[in-house]
Amino acid sequence: GAVVSQHPSWVICKSGTSVKIECRSLDFQATTMFWYRQFPKQSLMLMATSNEGSKATYEQGVEKDKFLINHASLTLSTLTVTSAHPEDSSFYICSAIARTSGVYEQYFGPGTRLTVT
Amino acid sequence: AQSVAQPEDQVNVAEGNPLTVKCTYSVSGNPYLFWYVQYPNRGLQFLLKYITGDNLVKGSYGFEAEFNKSQTSFHLKKPSALVSDSALYFCAVRAYSGNTPLVFGKGTRLSVIA
């Protein structure tokens, strides 16, 4: 099956700094990628939809100026958490859409654990 | 709009006994249903999916799920639970057509006791 990677797998940063998380589709091209956020012991909440070559679409309640998403190519989307604060600490998971035999399949990355101190 | 309900926060079962993790869904059009498992500090692992065809879907690690259209349910089952099955289980749904994102249930923590 299709593989999605994320880098880094975990990161610790100081409050006020910015952190960039990369999401790559390794063996397929993805015009659409999604970013999810998961708080401890909770479900995955969709943050935004990233479309190659256009602006991301953010879910209600997600600050687009804090969570900058760039989908510069068909294999790479990045999420930048700007001016991070401890409440931004979370598990961030990306996923990419591949069209297989006429069906859109969603493949997930392994996640990035962000801890803001 | 799509939604998923997992009514149980926690399911406890003795090792060797059958297990069921419940899921009901709401979606416009035909559903595309999934079960994922997540171990601590790890990403999602795909277990199984239903698109069309047989209502009983078999997946990884001996898990299966039964699609019931009239009850809009997609319960996860396993005939004999293992301690290693203890984890967080997520049901997810999206409309079959299009490239809309999966919507996840809140998750059910399964604890298998030896």
Image (cartoon, coloured by chain):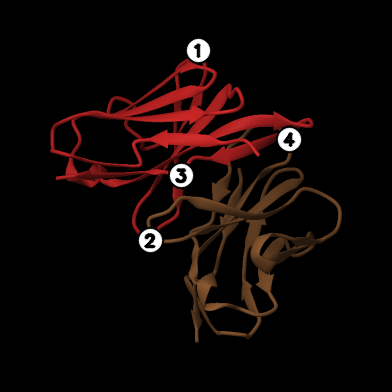
Chain colours: A red, B brown
Q: As shown in the figure, which amino acid type bears the numbered disc 4?
A: Ser
Q: Specify the quadrant that holds the C terminus of chain A.
A: top left
The one of B102 and A108 positioned closer to us in this rendering: A108
Question: Callout 1 environment at 10 Å: few (<14), some (14 to 19), or many (20+)?
Answer: few
Label 1: which residue?
Answer: A53
Q: Relative to A3, say whether B83 is above or below.
A: below
Q: Are marks 4 and 3 in contact (CB under 8 Å)?
A: no
C-alpha distance separating marks 2 and 4: 31 Å
Label 4: which residue?
Answer: B97
Q: Secondary structure at mark 1?
A: loop
Same-chain status of marks 3 and 2: yes
> Which x, y percent locates residue B81?
61, 78
Q: Secondary structure at mark 3?
A: loop
Q: As shown in the figure, which amino acid type bears the numbered disc 2?
A: Lys
Looking at the image, is mark 3 or mark 2 earlier in the sequence?
Answer: 2
C-alpha distance separating marks 4 and 3: 25 Å
Residue at x 18% of width, y 30% of height: A83
Between marks 3 and 2 in the image, the one whose residue lies nearer the viewer: 3
C-alpha distance separating marks 3 and 2: 17 Å
